[in-house]
């Protein structure tokens, strides 16, 4: 497997949008892993990449018809190579989760792994697909939070809502969407933004944190919301839907940055915003969808 083919298989630029999940959860929960916090986003990235490789393994027959340029149907990657890579990355993700928080982290990482594999091998072709994918990203937030669902509830809800909307819209990447699915995606984006704004509630929030959240949410709305609104105007145009899906995949970093700022971590939020810019640049070379 050549490096370029592997990058296409796992949609490498999209992996840059993943660390913010567990970091948002960790910030909301008071950084429960301390100096080992780095291992949680590393685990998240490995599990995400595993899911992408597994997705192409499961979709090999469908991609042969709808997306023959993908690595497996084009013959550049063997299907069982993809499966082996997915298994190896899953093992790496679970190991890194154990490094981050031992049994506490594994109590979230194992259900997260099961959710990812369930989505790829079954749910993605059913009506349950968006909900299962949303659950996966919500669990990813809780992975960083040390499994504390109470303190990380709003970040998990925001990321899950965003993911549900993007996944719903992504089903129209090849043949176009419907007005109903485009509307649902836009509504999910609004829900994600509202949940993030709610995370600011409380007298101890500093003015600079409020401004940082407002700026990040404005950027999120201007990118993801605008792209989804374009898809709503012309839902039958697969190209517009595909562009909105890609923008949604990359645009989650704006939401994550807002959540980090709301939790009092503006420096990390700024770094994540820069990572989102890098993802946009990398997406010009390798598609994130």
Image (cartoon, rainbow, N blue to C red):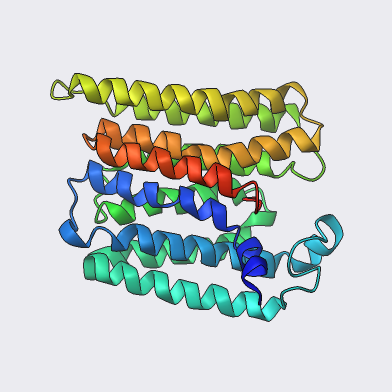
In the picture provided, is 278 more to the left or to the right than 208?
right
Image spot of residue 80 (x, y percent): 67, 80
Is 25 above or below relative to 115? above
Asked if residue 151 lies left or right of residue 185, the reply is left
As drawn, 260 above or below 225: below
For residue 106, which quarter of the picture?
A: bottom left
84 over 213 or under it: above or below: below
| Extreme residue toward the right, this view | 65
> Above or below — where is 78 with respect to 157?
below
**Viewer-proximal residue among 68 and 167:** 68
Give the residue displayed 20% in from the left and 19% down from the top. Answer: 207
List x then y, in percent, for residue 230.
Answer: 69, 24
Q: Is residue 39 left or right of residue 254?
A: left
Quarter assignment of residue 70: bottom right
Which quadrant does the N terminus fall into? bottom right
Q: Can the viewer see residue 93 in this picture? A: yes
Residue sitting at x 34%, y 42%: 271
Residue 270 in percent (x, y) is at 33, 36
The residue shown at (24%, 26%) is 209
Quarter of image, res 224 = top right
Figure disc tally: 0
Q: Position of residue 30 (x, y in %)?
A: 17, 45
Horizontally, is 127 left or right of 12 in the view?
right
Residue 151 appears in the picture as rendered? no
Camera-nearest residue between 196 and 181: 196
């Amino acid at each position: 497997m050549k490096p370029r083919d592997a990058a296409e298989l796992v949609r490498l630029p999209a992996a840059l949008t993943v660390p913010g999940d567990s970091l948002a959860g960790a910030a909301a929960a008071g950084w429960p892993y301390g100096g080992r916090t780095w291992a949680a986003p590393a685990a998240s990235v490995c599990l995400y990449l595993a899911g992408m490789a597994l997705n192409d393994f499961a979709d090999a027959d469908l991609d042969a018809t709808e997306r023959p340029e993908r690595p497996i149907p084009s013959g550049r990657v063997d299907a069982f190579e993809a499966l082996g890579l997915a298994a190896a990355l899953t093992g790496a993700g679970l190991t890194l989760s154990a490094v981050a928080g031992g049994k506490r982290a594994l109590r979230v990482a194992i259900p997260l792994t099961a959710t990812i594999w369930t989505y790829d091998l079954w749910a993605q072709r059913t009506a349950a697909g968006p909900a299962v994918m949303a659950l996966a990203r919500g669990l990813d937030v809780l992975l960083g939070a040390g499994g504390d669902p109470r303190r990380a509830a709003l970040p998990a809800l925001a990321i899950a809502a965003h993911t549900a909307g993007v996944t719903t819209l992504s089903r129209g990447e090849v043949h176009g969407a419907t007005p109903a699915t485009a509307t649902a995606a836009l509504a999910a984006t609004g829900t994600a933004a509202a949940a993030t704004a709610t995370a600011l509630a409380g007298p101890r929030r500093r003015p600079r944190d409020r401004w940082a959240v407002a700026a990040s949410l404005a950027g999120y709305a201007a990118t993801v919301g605008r792209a989804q609104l374009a898809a709503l105007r012309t839902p039958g145009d697969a190209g517009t839907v595909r562009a909105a899906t890609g923008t949604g995949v990359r645009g989650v970093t704006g939401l994550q940055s807002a959540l980090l700022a709301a939790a009092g971590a503006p420096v990390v939020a700024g770094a994540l915003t820069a990572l989102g810019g890098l993802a946009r640049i990398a997406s010009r070379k390798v598609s994130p969808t």
